[in-house]
């Protein structure tokens, strides 16, 4: 790949971009949600005051709901983990009323990403391979370099219309 | 640019000693729909030339049979409000530019906090109609001077009950803005010091700019006359003391796209080269001002060259 192609890929607006440094300098309250202890970013210890949630905790879902439900404007959210985890939390945070600018995503773990099948509408976690069989409709999907922030997922479309199904159907 | 709308003044009433309300009905057909927060430019045929002043639409956006505006008399301005207060009568025909919106409601907010100062209540009248129809969660904080700038206050008291908070002077903004739920957005309209105070307080409480919406009502202020040199069309014009640069261009048949006519929206941006520019806008950054000016409010001397 040439340098100019490389640069063009990096600038592609259809892919999510993650900040290298956290943004919430002006925030009054920091909310940290990490997938695991291993996902924690080094800057977490500098956030003051901060409430920290770890998804390894058995009561995580309820605690997260409580955290987002009681937070007030002036809070900044930091999410750390793999892509599937980050964007799932991102969606919950947006639903709770946080703005894009109040959410910081740190891609600290390699792992699955979310894929949206345009044929059956199923949102699914998948390993970062270019092709996969949809868990919902078994269509063999090509995962495009096209990301939806609203869905928190990459878009998967039928790879071969002449032979749409993977496995059992073909 | 779309053609101006022809409307007839179908009713007027004094809302306070200093605020006159106008109802406009279309001379033919229906009026274009508008979204809450929209304004129209009213074309005012003064003896010194046509002024176009922007006024927020106060009527219900769901009703396109008429538009309403409320105008505060400004004794020390260029005469637009004086004309509307003293000259315009029921039955008169006026021209309006189609509605434009520079102060829209945020679509996903779950709590709308409205802060109005005096005649800054006007865009919120349309907001309130829309928010009531959507059964949205909102509250209005209204600062006014009794008898002078308390337009619609009786109506609002009846309509809003405990959602209305009134103040004879600047309220404690910290109290209004602190510890608000995550879906909150704040909107302010009124005199510049009030808008600045809201933005400052919101910032101090950690609100990002995306949650803070404001509309200034500013208009061109008079100044010294000066000359214009239009480089591309090789023309020379003169801007009168009471005239804005944009109005001088329009009088010469040059139509520069524009919306707010108050130096805030950025639509009429023009590249300049030469002359001492007196920037009066609140849109361009200092770096941009080195290259561009906003002809709706800014002036210069002795001769300003423009890329037009």
Image (cartoon, rainbow, N blue to C red):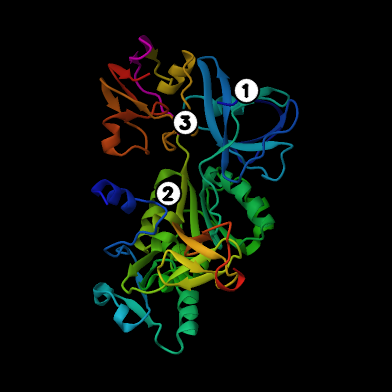
- Secondary element under disc 2, as helix, strand or loop, is helix
Subunit under mark 3: B
Residue tagged by mark 2? B195
The residue under label 1 is: B87
Q: Name the residue under label 3.
A: B261
Closest to the camera, between mark 1 and mark 2, is 2
Q: Is residue B225 above or below residue A92?
A: above
Apparent side of residue B186 relative to residue B302 in the rendered image (left or right): right
Asked if residue B23 lies in the magenta stretch, the reply is: no
The quarter of the picture where residue A130 lies is: bottom left
Q: Can residue B148 be seen in this view?
A: yes
Looking at the image, which residue is at 75% across and 29% down? B29
The percent coordinates of residue B55 (x first, y second) are 56, 35
Image location of residue B305, percent across then percent down: 30, 18
Do marks 1 and 3 share a subunit? yes
As measured in the structure, the alpha-carbon distance from the residue carrying label 1 to the one carrying label 2 is: 32 Å
For marks 1 and 3, the one nearer the N-term is: 1
In the current view of this chain or complex, which residue is farthest to the front? A170
């Amino acid at each position: 790949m040439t340098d100019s192609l490389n640069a063009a890929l990096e600038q592609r607006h259809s892919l999510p971009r993650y900040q290298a440094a956290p943004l919430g300098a002006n925030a009054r309250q920091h909310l940290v949600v990490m997938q695991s202890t291993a996902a924690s970013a080094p800057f977490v210890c500098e956030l003051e005051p901060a409430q920290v949630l770890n998804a390894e905790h058995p009561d995580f879902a309820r605690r997260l709901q409580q955290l987002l439900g009681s937070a007030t404007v002036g809070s900044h959210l930091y999410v750390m983990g793999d892509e599937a985890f980050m964007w799932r939390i991102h969606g919950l945070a947006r639903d709770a009323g946080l703005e894009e600018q109040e959410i910081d995503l740190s891609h600290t773990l390699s792992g699955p990403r979310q894929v949206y099948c345009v044929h059956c509408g199923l949102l699914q976690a998948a390993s970062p391979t270019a092709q996969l069989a949809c868990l919902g409709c078994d269509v063999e999907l090509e995962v495009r370099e096209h990301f939806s922030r609203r869905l928190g997922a990459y878009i998967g479309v039928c790879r071969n219309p002449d032979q749409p199904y993977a496995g059992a159907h073909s | 640019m779309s053609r101006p709308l022809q409307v007839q003044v179908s009713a007027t009433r004094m809302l306070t000693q200093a605020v006159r309300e106008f109802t406009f009905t279309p001379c033919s057909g229906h009026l274009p729909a508008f979204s809450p927060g929209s304004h129209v430019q009213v074309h005012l045929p003064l003896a010194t030339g046509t002024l176009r002043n922007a006024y927020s639409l106060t009527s219900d956006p769901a009703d396109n049979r008429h538009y309403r505006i409320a105008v505060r008399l400004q004794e020390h301005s260029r005469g637009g409000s004086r004309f509307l207060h003293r000259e315009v009568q029921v039955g008169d025909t006026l021209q309006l530019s189609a509605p434009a919106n520079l102060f829209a409601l945020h679509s996903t907010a779950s709590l709308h906090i409205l802060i109005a100062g005096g005649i800054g209540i006007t865009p919120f009248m349309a907001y309130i109609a829309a928010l009531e129809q959507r059964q949205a969660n909102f509250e209005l904080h209204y600062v006014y001077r009794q008898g002078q700038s308390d337009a619609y206050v009786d109506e609002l008291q009846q309509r809003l009950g405990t959602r209305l908070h009134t103040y004879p002077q600047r309220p404690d903004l910290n109290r209004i803005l602190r510890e608000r739920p995550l879906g909150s957005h704040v909107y302010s309209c009124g005199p510049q010091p009030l808008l600045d105070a809201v933005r400052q307080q919101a910032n101090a409480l950690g609100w990002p700019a995306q949650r803070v919406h404001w509309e200034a009502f500013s208009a061109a202020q008079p100044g010294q006359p000066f000359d214009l040199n239009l480089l591309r069309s090789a023309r020379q014009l003169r801007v009168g003391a009471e005239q804005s640069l944009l109005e001088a261009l329009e009088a010469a048949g040059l139509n520069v796209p524009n919306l707010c006519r108050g130096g805030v929206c950025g639509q009429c941006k023009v590249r300049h080269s030469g002359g001492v520019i007196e920037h009066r806008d609140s849109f361009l950054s200092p770096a941009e001002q080195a290259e561009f000016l906003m002809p709706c409010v800014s002036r210069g001397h002795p001769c300003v060259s423009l890329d037009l």
